[in-house]
Image (tube, grey):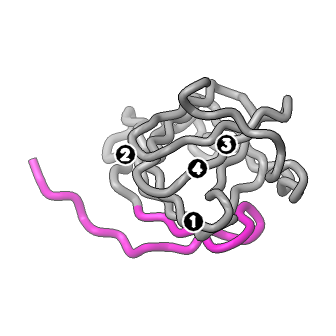
Amino acid sequence: MNIEPTFPTTKNPPDQFAGDVWLDPIALPHEGDQRMVVATVRFAPGARTAWHSHARGQYLRVTAGVGRFGTRDGQIIEVHPGQTIYTPPGEEHWHAAAEGCFMEHIAMLESADDPSASTIWLEHITDDEYRGTTTSGADA
């Protein structure tokens, strides 16, 4: 048993994120057969990911602020602290902070057999996609 090393906060790259988004790793695989990756991700107001998908799906637990999560069918779900959203394997989606507030979530996913294929990054979302009609996380 050991206390995990602390990694420095990193700013996520602009080819995958719009606005200021920071990442703090919580858990990374130690052994070749381990797949779990967990990180805290902080979004400045209005900051967002590009479209992307995960080979094995992803859980996101909002811990502060209001998160906006969108899918290709135009659905946007607002998620509040204490709520967890799940995106299944291969589902193209984005996540963002609502305008006017920071948002923090804990991202949990399993690496693919080829770790470089765990997350497939696509194009940036448009302002219209970001501002689409919302559905309350309680209704989702």
Residue position marked by numbered label 4 in the rendering: 67
Kindly check if marks 3 and 4 are in contact, taking CB atoms under 8 A apart as contact: yes
Check the image and report above or below for 130 versus 78: below
The residue lying furthest to the left in this view is: 1
Which picture quadrant has residue 52? top right
* Pointer 3 local density, CA inside 10 Å: few below 14, some 14–19, many at least 20: many
* Pointer 1 local density, CA inside 10 Å: few below 14, some 14–19, many at least 20: some
In the rendered image, residue 116 lying in the magenta stretch gets the answer: no
Kindly check if marks 1 and 4 are in contact, taking CB atoms under 8 A apart as contact: no
Q: Residue 41 location in percent, x, y? A: 49, 59
Front tag of 2 and 3: 3
Check the image and report above or below for 50 versus 107: below
- For badge 3, the amino acid type reads Phe
Residue position marked by numbered label 3 in the rendering: 69
Residues drawn in magenta: 1-24
Front tag of 2 and 1: 1
Mark 2 vs mark 4, CA separation in Å: 27 Å
Secondary structure character of the magenta stretch overall: loop
Residue 110 in view of the camera: no
Check the image and report above or below for 71 versus 17: above
Q: Earlier in the sequence, mark 1 or mark 3?
A: 3
Return the mark for residue 29: 2
Q: Earlier in the sequence, mark 2 or mark 4?
A: 2
* Pointer 2 local density, CA inside 10 Å: few below 14, some 14–19, many at least 20: few
Q: Earlier in the sequence, mark 1 or mark 4?
A: 4
Q: At numbered mark 1, what does the secondary structure look like: helix, strand or loop?
A: loop
- For badge 1, the amino acid type reads Cys
Mark 2 vs mark 3, CA separation in Å: 27 Å
- For badge 4, the amino acid type reads Gly
Residue position marked by numbered label 1 in the rendering: 101
- For badge 2, the amino acid type reads Pro
Which picture quadrant has residue 70? top right
